[in-house]
């Protein structure tokens, strides 16, 4: 006796299961793509106008998250990137590996550029967790009253200012940047004589 063709209902059931698995697979791939695109940094940094361009940088002093006294004047003679950041800022989180690479690249150079973080509308504890072991790689200053953000005219992180070795603000950035973006702008400023 031969087993005849499968009953019609069984075949339809297999096709439905196959379609379900294909749909689930396509859905999983789609969700994965959305997750990658949503978490990948856009890095469309914008060099922006500011009334502070060409002016002396407002003072930044305080105690860092690593419990060290800090004054922006300690970095006189260096290019300095002042980064306003927050743990809740998705773009800040996306660009942090780039900023860490920038710090590591220039840390050993005696007159190399430096990075200073200023906490924007966030707690020191949340930023400590966000930065993890990088918390001591560069000075990060709390700004609990928002006075530094006000002095620099910051509306929403990530915003950055580039200060030349003489202490003048020469560039403002809106949005996330890469290590190469910062290196390019600093190299251009060096050629221009800043």
Image: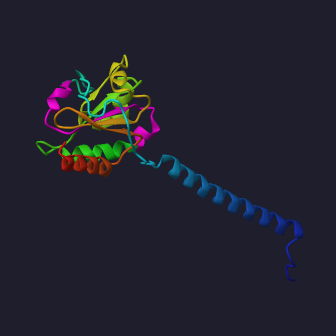
The stretch in magenta equals 70-94
**Residue at the spot x=23%, y=23% of the render?**
59
- Give x and y (percent) for residue 176: 40, 43
Image quarter hosting the C terminus: top left
The answer to if 75 sits in the magenta stretch is yes
**Residue at the spot x=16%, y=44% of the render?**
112
Depth check, front residue: 168 or 160: 168
Depth check, front residue: 10 or 171: 171
Number of marks drawn: 0
Depth check, front residue: 168 or 182: 168
Seen as rendered, the residue at the extreme left is 110
- Give x and y (percent) for residue 29: 59, 58
The answer to if 122 sits in the magenta stretch is no
* Vertical arrangement, residue 7 with respect to residue 193, above or below: below
- Give x and y (percent) for residue 155: 43, 28
Q: Can you tell which quarter of the image residue 5 is in?
A: bottom right
**Residue at the spot x=30%, y=34% of the render?**
53
* Vertical arrangement, residue 144 with respect to residue 178, above or below: above
- Give x and y (percent) for residue 139: 24, 31
Left or right: where does residue 21 sit relative to residue 107?
A: right
Depth check, front residue: 119 or 190: 190
Q: Can you tell which quarter of the image residue 78 is in?
A: top left
Image quarter hosting the N terminus: bottom right
């Amino acid at each position: 006796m031969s087993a005849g063709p499968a009953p019609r209902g069984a075949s339809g059931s297999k096709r439905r299961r196959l379609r379900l698995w294909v749909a689930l697979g396509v859905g999983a791939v789609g969700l994965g793509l959305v997750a990658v695109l949503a978490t990948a940094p856009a890095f469309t940094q914008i060099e922006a106008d500011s009334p502070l361009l060409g002016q002396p940088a407002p003072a930044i002093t305080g105690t860092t998250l690593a419990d060290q006294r800090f004054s922006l004047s300690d970095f006189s003679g260096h290019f300095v990137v002042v980064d306003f950041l927050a743990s809740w800022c998705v773009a800040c989180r996306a660009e942090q590996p780039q900023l860490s690479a920038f710090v590591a690249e220039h840390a050993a150079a005696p007159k190399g550029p430096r990075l200073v973080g200023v906490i924007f509308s966030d707690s020191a504890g949340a930023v400590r967790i966000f930065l993890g072991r990088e918390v001591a790689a560069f000075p990060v200053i709390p700004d609990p009253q928002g006075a530094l953000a006000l002095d620099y005219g910051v509306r929403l992180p990530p915003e950055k200012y580039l200060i030349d070795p003489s202490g003048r603000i020469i560039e403002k950035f809106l949005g996330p940047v890469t290590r190469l973006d910062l290196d390019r702008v600093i190299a251009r400023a060096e050629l221009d004589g800043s």
